[in-house]
Image (cartoon, helix red, strand yellow):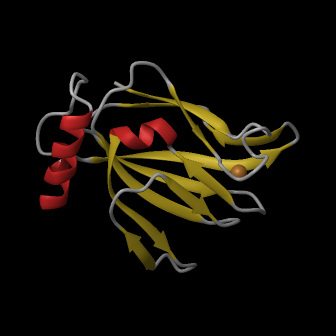
Amino acid sequence: MKPLTTSLAVLVVSLAGSAFAEGDLSRANVMDVVIEMGSNDDGMYLKPDHYEFVTGQAYKLILTNVDEIKHELALNEMGERIFTRKVEIADENGDLFAEIKGSIREVEVGAGKTVEWFIVPIQTTDEPVEITCEIPGHLEAGMRASAMIN
Ligand SMILES: [Cu+2]
């Protein structure tokens, strides 16, 4: 519990004035959110293209790359308003291959792969913020979505 307490203390100092989640963030039930990354005739996409989160709720972002090339999910401003519990990567058999903890802003997902990013939003956004694929050319091709934390 110490890392979470430390992170929150730092954020409280730097972001005073915004609304923060209350309660024990480590014990919330996890809600699945599938974020599909891919290409079609119109270009590239994140699907769906809008996400709604609430502070204090635990989410499992299921980053599903259905494409034949790698993609990347960057939370940008939203990344400063969440606590990452862990990122899980499984092999072809579904066995856990790697688990990463700590502050994470971007996750790259290989072609045809899925990565699970466990987060808890800790601060609301004033307006929708943009999440993007940061691989050169992909944002321009349409890989963006909006996200709101209430
Ligand atoms: Cu991409």
Above/below status of 122 relative to 6? above
Q: Residue at x 45, y 19 (%)?
A: 127
Q: Residue at x 33, y 61 (%)?
A: 102
Give the position of the C terminus as an image quadrant.
Answer: top left
Tell me where residue 10 sits by quadrant. Answer: top left
Horizontal side, residue 129 vs residue 83: left or right? right
Give the position of the N terminus as an image quadrant.
Answer: bottom left
Relative image position of residue 59 (x, y in whole percent): 36, 46
75 or 67, nearer to the observer: 75
Residue 14 visible here: yes
Q: Residue at x 58, y 78 (%)?
A: 92
Q: Residue furthest right?
A: 41
Above/below status of 64 relative to 59? below
Relative image position of residue 2 (x, y in whole percent): 12, 60
Horizontal side, residue 7 vs residue 100: left or right? left
Above/below status of 104 relative to 41? below
11 or 147, nearer to the observer: 11
Relative image position of residue 25 (x, y in whole percent): 18, 46
